[in-house]
Amino acid sequence: MRAQAGYQGLAQIKALGFKPDIIIGHHGWGEMLNLCDVFPGVPILGYFEFYYRIHDSDVNFDPEFPMHVTNYGAVRGKNTINLLALALEQWGQTPTRWQYDTYPAWARGKMRIIEEGVDLSLCAPDPSLFKKTVKVGPLTVTPKQKLITFVSRNLEPYRGFHTMMRALPAILKARPDVVVSLVGGDDISYGAMPAEGGNWRQKMMKELEGQIDISRVHFMGKVPYGDHLTLLKRSDAHVYLSYPFVASWSLREALGCGCAIIGADSVTVAEFIKDGVNGISTPTLDHDKLAENVLRLLGDAKLTAKLRKGARDYAEAHLGMDAYIARYRAYIEEIVGAKLLPDAPAKPVKAPAAKPAAKAKPKSKAK
């Protein structure tokens, strides 16, 4: 249905007399599959995000949530659009080495790794935030307090929410000055809801009832982007956990903001976080080790400063938006075989000066 809708949309554009030099889109849901029939010969550049696998990936990574072998076929079935898109024999791109490697060797020939970027002018350190009281929604953190941050679109095991929550009792007990920010909704982005019902926040709060000081743990929900960046820039320790799956944009933003990051040792995160250089690597599912690493970071100012600098240095070397666009642009030009329009924006056209209003002629007196 999505493929046919995409086809019909492009057919309307074609009827208006437009022919593209290239078609660019995401291969995840099927809209791109029939576009070659509208514009035969026009190259298609598709985003290949993830190739589902039974081993060495998210399936059965967490022994707490095993998948029965009878469901393996359904996982393979998720590659249907991937395979149809690859069969078009067009062009592809993906943002990380690991995502690239999830695809079969025979499929990689038409794919390119293009590291995604973030706006490093927005995602930048702000040391002034540590010198004043910062308030974001229900959370207030003073200069004398330590802020631990955690971000996920939705709070769920795929992003290590259960590991994070189980680490909090030890952290909060050891550091009375700690305040915790947990950004994310209560829905599901990946995986499934708890088998017994409810959401993962409710499940973990029930499991940890009486073990954490809830006055210092703030469930922020989904926040405006400016608040998200403020929390990252003020963070004393940012925790980013993930199964072997697609890395979040928030990890790139945290690196840009110069966060002191404790990152999972899963292959997804390890591609970004080098232990002792731009973050601390921690076992993805080990909450005791996570608590130990967070407390180690909070107690070592020199290590914190080193990791903050390392995070920003990594972002400037790999994650700049301008460099990302340049890489993408070069790939498009390679595929099309022609240069795109110049990079420089056109000079704004000055509006003509307004003419002074003509003076109204005096009305003749009525006779």
Image (cartoon, rainbow, N blue to C red):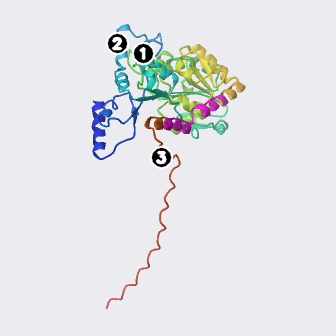
Dot 2, crowdedness within 10 Å: few (<14), some or many (≥20)?
few
On the image, numbered disc 2 is attached to which residue?
A: 73
* Identity of the residue drawn at 31% across and 39% down: 10
- Name the mark on residue 53: 1
Q: Are marks 2 and 1 in contact (CB under 8 Å)?
A: no
**For discs 2 and 3, the disc positioned in front in the rendered view:** 3
Q: Which of the marked residues, 2 or 1, is nearer the chain's N terminus?
A: 1
Find the magenta span and give its range. Answer: 309-330
Q: Main secondary structure of the magenta part?
A: helix
Q: Does 176 sit left or right of 347 as displayed? A: right
Tag 1, which secondary structure? Answer: loop
Rounded to the nearest angstrom, the CA distance separating label 1 from label 3 is 40 Å
Residue, disc 3? 341
Is 110 located above or below residue 230 in the figure?
A: above
Q: Amino acid at mark 2?
A: Gly
Q: Check disc 3 and report its element: helix, strand or loop.
A: loop
327 within the magenta span:
yes
Spot occupied by residue 226 in the image (x, y as percentages of width and height):
53, 39
Question: Which residue appears at 50% of the width and 61% of the height?
Answer: 350
Relative vertical location of residue 367 with respect to residue 13 in this rendering, above or below: below
Q: What residue is shown at x 63% (from left), y 20% (from top)?
A: 275
